[in-house]
Amino acid sequence: DTEVTQTPKHLVMGMTNKKSLKCEQHMGHRAMYWYKQKAKKPPELMFVYSYEKLSINESVPSRFSPECPNSSLLNLHLHALQPEDSALYLCASSQGRTVYEQYFGPGTRLTVT
Amino acid sequence: GNSVTQMEGPVTLSEEAFLTINCTYTATGYPSLFWYVQYPGEGLQLLLKATKADDKGSNKGFEATYRKETTSFHLEKGSVQVSDSAVYFCALTLIQGAQKLVFGQGTRLTINP
C-alpha cells in the first residue's frame, strides 16, 4: 500500500474559524511533511516530522499548527487564517531520516473567505 | 545553494510526438533526482527517480538519465498520449542532510489528439 490519504478533500472556512486537516499513511514511513501549493507553482515545504518529532519548521506563521499524534497520522490545525492562505495543502511521507522519494497525498483544497 | 531549473512551459504537442522536458540542477553534495507528475486536481505522483550518476530512471514509457557531467536529468518519452497531459516537476534531494525536496518551477504539458 503506497497511499497517503488526506481529509477533507475541500474545505471552506472563514477567517475566524478553527479547522483541522488530517493526513494518514500506513507504509511504516517515519517522516511526514506538510506542503502548501499555490496555483501554477511548485509545492512549498511548511513542516517536517521525523520519528514523530518536529524537525523542520520553515518559518510558518503560528496560525498553522502541526501535530503528529503517532507515526501514521499528521494533522494541521488552522486558526485565524487569511484569504492569502487559500491553497492546496499537500501531505507527504518518506521512509525516514535518509530521504529518498516522498509519497504525496491528493491534497486538501482550502478556501479562506 | 541547491536549485533546479526546468524548461519553461507550457509545452503543447500532438499525440504520438516525442517529448523532452529539460531539467538541470545545482547541488552542493550528491543529490538524488526525481520527476514528479501532477494531474489536474490531484496531488503529486512520483514518476521516476535516479540516485547516482549514470542511473536511468524509467516508468510508464518515461525515462531520465542522471548526467553528473552536465548536471542534468532530462525527461523523455518516445510517444506521448493525451493522458500524459499534466504538470511535471523535476526535484532533487541530498542523500545526507536536510529532509527537503527542492523543486523546479514545473512544466505544464498539453497533448492534443
Image (cartoon, rainbow, N blue to C red):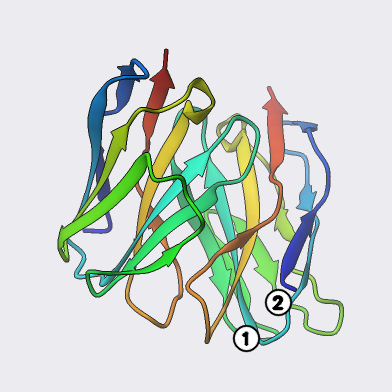
In percent of the image, x 46 and y 53: which residue is there?
A: A46
Q: Quadrant of residue A14?
A: top left
Query: How far, Cα to Cα, is label 1 from label 2?
Result: 7 Å
Q: Mark 1 points at which residue?
A: B52
Q: Quadrant of the C terminus of chain B?
A: top right
Quadrant where the N terminus of chain B sits is bottom right
Could you tell me how many numbered marks the image carries?
2
Percent of width and height locating residue B71:
81, 76
Give x and y (percent) for residue A18: 24, 28
User: Is residue A7 in view from this perspective?
Assistant: no
x then y, percent, for residue A81: 40, 28
Tag 1 and tag 2, C-beta contact below 8 Å: yes
Amino acid at the residue labelled 2: Tyr
User: Which quadrant of the figure has residue A6?
Assistant: top left
Q: Residue at x 77, y 79 (%)?
A: B67
Of residue B102 and residue A53, the one placed in the foreground of this image is A53
Seen at 55% across and 33% down, the residue is: B83
Q: Are marks 1 and 2 on the same chain?
A: yes
Looking at the image, is mark 1 or mark 2 earlier in the sequence? 1
- Label 2: state its secondary structure: loop
Q: Mark 2 lies on which chain?
A: B
> Which of A33 and B20 lies nearest the eye of the viewer?
A33
Residue B19 visible in the snapshot: yes
Circle 2 residue: B66
Task: Provide the secondary structure element on which disc 1 rests.
Answer: loop
Give the amino acid at mark 1.
Answer: Lys
Q: How crowded is mark 2: few (under 14 residues within 10 Å), some or many (20 or more)?
A: many
Task: Report in which chain the residue with disc 1 lies.
Answer: B
